[in-house]
Image (cartoon, rainbow, N blue to C red):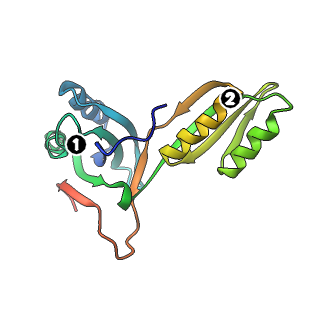
């Protein structure tokens, strides 16, 4: 997987109505305009009427403001917030199957424990492990596992929320129809 995104990537948290086809319309808007999506994750919020789409976009192609304007043309978009890394909590999930015979398992388990991961499946010669952390930590873990032999790898894409208010600046609300 590529290294952590450079400064020209921006994270947008897009609150949308939880309706059929909304994700297809949002991702289709990016595709039609040729915008590159670095990462995309979507799930319902605590309010079943809404879903949150976290999209990491390549701002080298066009301005964030232009992308936001295009998103707001979609009727089901409720609110868009740009989340800067300094003002948000970002995580990604990695599932990785690695070769680990009896003599190597201890090393893999030790590295996994240091980073706070878990073993989620065990085979005779392999382990499937899970780790949730920042994209750069997952990149580092991936590199540590390469010498053992990665047989399968899946990453979710980034999810993010604003950091809790501790008298710091609030996330920049780019445009919003609600709240």
Q: Which residue is mark 2?
A: 147
Sequence-wise, the earlier of marks 2 and 1 is 1
116 sits to left or right of 6: right
| Crowdedness near tag 2: few (<14), some (14–19) or many (≥20) residues, C-alpha within 10 Å | few
Q: Is residue 160 above or below residue 106?
A: below
Seen at 17% across and 28% down, the residue is 33
Seen at 71% across and 28% down, the residue is 148
What separation in Å lies between label 2 and label 1 (alpha carbons)? 46 Å
Q: Which residue is mark 1?
A: 76
Give the x, y percent position of residue 166: 39, 74
| Crowdedness near tag 1: few (<14), some (14–19) or many (≥20) residues, C-alpha within 10 Å | some
112 sits to left or right of 135: right
Seen at 43% across and 47% down, the residue is 159
Q: Single out the residue that lies furthest toward the right.
A: 102
Seen at 23% across and 37% down, the residue is 60
Q: How many marks?
A: 2
Q: For the residues labelled 2 and 1, say whether their Cβ atoms are less than 8 Å apart.
A: no
Secondary structure state at the residue bearing disc 1 = loop
Query: Which labelled disc corresponds to residue 168?
Result: none
Give the x, y percent position of residue 145: 66, 34
- Viewer-proximal residue among 137 and 36: 137
- Viewer-proximal residue among 127 and 78: 127
Which quadrant would residue 147 be assigned to in this image? top right
Give the x, y percent position of residue 75: 17, 41
Quadrant location, the C terminus: bottom left
Secondary structure state at the residue bearing disc 2 = helix
Q: Is residue 100 above or below residue 107?
A: above
Please name which of the two marks, 2 or 1, marks the residue nearer to the observer. 2
37 sits to left or right of 71: right
Give the x, y percent position of residue 134: 50, 48
Q: Single out the residue that lies furthest toward the bottom.
A: 167
């Amino acid at each position: 997987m590529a290294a952590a995104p450079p400064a020209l990537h921006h994270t947008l948290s897009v609150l949308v109505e939880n309706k059929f086809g909304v994700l297809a319309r949002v991702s289709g808007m990016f595709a039609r305009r040729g915008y590159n999506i670095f990462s995309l994750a979507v799930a319902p919020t605590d309010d079943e009427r809404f879903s949150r789409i976290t999209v990491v976009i390549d701002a080298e192609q066009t301005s964030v403001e232009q992308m936001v304007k295009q998103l707001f043309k979609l009727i089901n978009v409720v609110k868009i917030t740009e989340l800067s890394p300094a003002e948000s909590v970002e995580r990604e999930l990695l599932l990785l199957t690695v070769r680990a015979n009896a003599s190597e398992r201890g090393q893999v388990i030790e590295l996994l424990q240091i980073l706070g991961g878990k073993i989620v499946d065990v085979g005779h010669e392999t382990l499937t492990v899970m780790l949730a952390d920042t994209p750069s930590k997952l990149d580092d873990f991936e590199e540590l596992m390469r010498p053992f032999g990665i047989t399968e790898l899946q990453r979710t894409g980034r999810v993010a929320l604003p950091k809790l208010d501790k008298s710091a600046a609030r996330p920049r609300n780019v445009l919003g129809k609600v709240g």
